[in-house]
Amino acid sequence: MAREIKLPEISENIDTATVVRVLVAEGDKVDEDQSLIEIETEKAASDVPSPAAGTIKEVKVQQGDEIKVGSVILILEEGGGGEEEKEQKKAADKEEEQEQEEGSEEKDEKEGKEEAEDENAEEKESGEKETGKEKEDETEQEEKETSEKEEKESEEEKKEEQRKESTKSEGKSKSGEQEQISDTEKQKGEQVPASPSVRRFAREIGIDITQVKGTAPGNRITMDDVKAYSKEKNQQDKKGIAGAAGFELPDFSKWGDTERKPMSKVRQITAKNTLQSWNSIPHVTQFDKADITNLENFRKQYAGYVEKAGGKLTVTAILLKIAGFALQQFPRFNSSLDSQRNEIVYKKYIHIGVAVDTDRGLLVPVIRDVDKKSITALAVELGEMAEKARNKKISPDEMEGGNFTISNLGGLGGTAFTPVIFPPQVSIMGVSCATTEPVYADGAFQPRQILPLNISYDHRVIDGADGARFLRWVCEALENPFALFLKEGGE
Ligand code: CAO
């Protein structure tokens, strides 16, 4: 039986997705749960699996399409598509044909009625048009009068502007090129039909009036047109990442060949979020180092134990547990700032995001209730979540609700970096590469495994001293986990 496969619900507040790749073609046989298409939304990338086994009859989408939740992606012929089914299909088609024949008389009658109704409607509309035309004439007359009045105003305004211009000294603040552009723009602006008050309003809110489409008779631009254009422009600016950054690109072709590629949704989201975070949060980054020589021995000793449970006892898994403890000791790091109400929202749960490097870019799955889980359980969950993120199986919900983030770049190398906070969180811990360093202790240099750590925090919520205390607490916990049972934090 043919079945329409629709784009399923993805997540709350998400109603469209972009088709990144179509993984099947017409005639393909698919299994239940086999990925049909790859999609990207504002929040994540994922696959749409087939709800049943069958044969693809028709593919209705293609790469790059923006599709709505509930829209048909493809038609699936359920089952193996064997002879029996073909027979069933033939019978069904025949039945449908018969139904259509029977219904055709009825349809003709109905269509006749509809046509008559349409004609009536047309007549009615043309009648309305006549009355409308009279009204339009009246409006045009009014417009003409207003426009004459406005032209007078405009003349006076021009004179005023000329007076102002002549008092300005030559090339005081702008380059000659800029002057030229604004002069041309001004000339063009004077040619578009708009009243001086509308022109002035556009100028005051920084809108180039030549770009506004007039909706009044004679394409005259009204105040509402300027407002509508400004609103649309704002929305576009918010959407366009490059626009939001406010950089005008030069013509690169002057210096060599270039190629343009669209940013993936994940890239766009990262760009938007990091820019917003960087622009709105006063970041401070604190650095420290932990001697993890003993911890590394522990890791080797218990690697097999965790492996049996299906996980890998990595530095990140251990750090998750330690950060969970630290957030309980320093609740401010587990909070969010409500700047509208001047309040700090303290969360009673410990959900930590872990930055995962995927071939589509950065994804941050959230491990929930870290404080209630063992290191083994955390290691297993972290492995599963990282794999899901890399295989595009992670859902947007699994990346929401984190209070704090760990970003471990140590596996890739590096001595230090300053991570960017994920709003509405107020801090993020970065981990660089552990190396063997000579440490002077007991009267001699000794080779020790040293792990560089950092924490970026929102200075509106957290002071420097708290940042230093938090990170030191983490370092000491890594060096001597028993201290966890003795220590108290801040706040
Ligand atoms: N220093 C030295 N070695 C480290 C290390 C560190 N800080 N962290 C991990 N390693 C080593 C591990 O021990 C492992 O080595 P072995 O294979 O020899 O055991 C190797 O690096 C790979 O580790 P892993 O990735 O399997 O496991 P992990 O739990 O340490 O890390 C994850 C998991 C998801 C954090 C990591 O895979 C990852 O994606 N990191 C990148 C995060 C990122 O992109 N951050 C930037 C965010 S801002 O753009």
Image: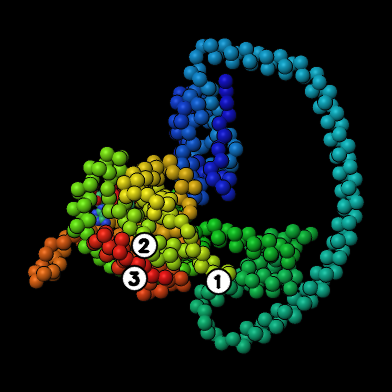
Question: Residue 326 got which mark?
Answer: 2
The foreground one among 290 and 56 is: 290
Q: What element carries label 2?
A: helix
In the depicted structure, whether residue 9 falls above or below residue 132: above
Q: In this view, does 110 lie to the left or right of 175?
A: right
Residue 274 in view in this figure: no
Q: How far apart are marks 2 and 1 (CA)?
A: 25 Å
Q: Is mark 1 on a helix, strand or loop?
A: loop
Q: Which residue position is annotated with label 1?
A: 342
Residue at 53% from the left image edge and 22% from the top image edge: 78
Ligand 1 contact, mark 3 (Cβ < 8 Å): no
Q: Residues within 10 Å of mark 3 (few under 14, many from 20)?
A: some
In the depicted structure, whether residue 352 falls above or below residue 96: below
- Amino acid at circle 3: Arg
The foreground one among 54 and 254 is: 54
Residue at 18% from the left image edge and 53% from the top image edge: 297
Q: Which residue position is annotated with label 3?
A: 469
Looking at the image, is mark 1 or mark 3 earlier in the sequence? Answer: 1
Image location of residue 410, percent across then percent down: 27, 56
Image location of residue 81, percent across then percent down: 50, 17
